[in-house]
C-alpha cells in the first residue's frame, strides 16, 4: 500500500458525455466513482473524493467539497484538497481514467522528490495533469489562480518545478469523455487478461 493520500477528482461538468460520468455504472459498481474509490482504497493509505456535492453519490467515502461559488474548475479542487488534508504531497487522479493502476502510480511515486512541485504523467498524446503528485508548495499559486479565475493547469506546471514521467502505454490513460469511449471502456474491462 502506498504511504500517500490520493484524491479522486469527480467534480467535472461532463459536458461531452452528456451526463455526469462519475455516476455511470462501471466494473460491477453502481458508479464509476465508487469503482475508482474501491480500487484506489486498496492501493493508498487514504482516499478522498473531490466534488461539488456529495449528495449525488450513494456510497460512503471522505468527500472534499469545492467552494460552492466556484464553477466547475480543477483549481477549486486543488485548493480544497490542500486545505482539507494535512499532507505535503498528494496523488491526484481524474475519475474518468479507470485503467491507470499500480504500475503507473509506482513510477510516479519513484520519480517524486523534495526538489519538485509536481510529478505528472505524460504520454505521446500529451501531459495528464490529473494523474500525478502535487506538493503543498503549489497551494499559494492555486489560491491566486482561483481568485483570478485562471484554471490553466498546464501553464502552472510549466512555470514551476515539474517532473514529467513518460509512459508508452497510451491505453492506460484512456479518458472516458464521450459516450463511445465509455462503451469501449466497458467492453475492455470485461475482456479477459486486461
Image (cartoon, rainbow, N blue to C red):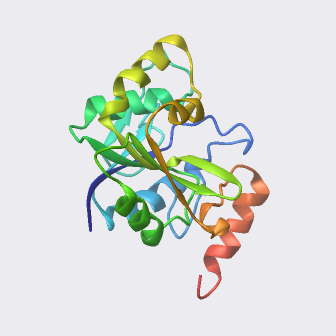
Depth check, front residue: 169 or 95: 169
Please name whichever residue, 188 or 59, is drawn nearer the observer in this view of the structure. Answer: 188
- Residue 37: x, y in percent? 40, 57
Which residue sits at x=46%, y=43%? 162
Left/right placement of residue 12 relative to residue 124 reads left
- The residue positioned 39% from the left and 59% from the top of the image is 111
Residue lying at the far right in this picture: please name it.
Answer: 180
Height in image: 169 above or below 61? below
* Image-based side of 8 in relation to 136, left or right: right
Which residue sits at x=55%, y=62%? 98
Measured as percent of width and height from the top left, residue 76 is found at 45, 26
Taking the image as shown, residue 130 lies to the left or right of residue 175, namely left
Q: Quadrant of the C terminus?
A: bottom right
> Which residue is found at the position 45% from the left and 72% from the top?
103
Q: Would residue 186 be visible to someone looking at this image? A: yes
Quarter of the figure with residue 44: bottom left
Q: Nearer the viewer, residue 98 or 18?
A: 98
Say if residue 39 shows up in the picture: no
Q: Indicate the position of residue 52 as horizontal and vertical percent values.
A: 47, 31
Please say if 69 is above or below 171: above
Q: How many marks?
A: 0
* Residue with the most extreme bottom position: 193
The percent position of residue 178, horizontal first and vertical second, equals: 75, 50
Q: Quadrant of the N terminus?
A: bottom left
- Residue occupying the far top of the picture: 148
Amino acid at each position: 500500500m502506498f504511504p500517500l493520500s490520493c484524491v479522486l477528482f469527480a467534480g467535472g461538468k461532463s459536458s461531452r458525455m452528456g451526463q455526469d460520468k462519475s455516476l455511470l455504472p462501471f466494473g460491477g459498481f453502481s458508479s464509476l466513482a465508487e469503482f475508482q474509490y474501491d480500487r484506489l482504497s486498496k492501493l493508498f493509505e487514504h482516499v478522498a473524493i473531490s466534488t461539488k456535492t456529495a449528495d449525488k453519490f450513494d456510497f460512503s467515502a471522505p468527500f472534499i467539497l469545492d467552494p460552492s461559488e466556484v464553477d466547475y474548475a480543477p483549481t477549486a479542487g486543488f485548493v480544497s484538497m490542500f486545505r482539507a488534508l494535512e499532507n505535503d504531497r498528494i496523488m491526484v487522479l481524474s475519475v474518468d481514467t479507470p485503467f491507470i493502476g499500480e504500475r503507473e502510480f509506482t513510477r510516479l511515486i519513484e520519480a517524486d522528490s523534495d526538489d519538485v512541485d509536481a510529478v505528472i504523467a505524460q504520454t505521446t498524446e500529451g501531459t495528464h495533469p490529473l494523474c500525478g503528485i502535487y506538493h503543498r508548495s503549489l497551494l499559494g499559486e492555486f489560491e491566486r489562480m482561483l481568485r483570478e479565475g485562471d484554471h490553466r493547469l498546464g501553464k502552472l506546471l510549466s512555470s514551476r518545478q515539474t517532473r514529467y514521467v513518460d509512459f508508452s502505454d497510451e491505453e492506460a490513460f484512456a479518458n472516458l469523455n464521450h459516450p463511445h469511449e465509455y462503451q469501449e471502456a466497458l467492453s475492455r474491462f470485461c475482456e479477459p487478461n486486461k
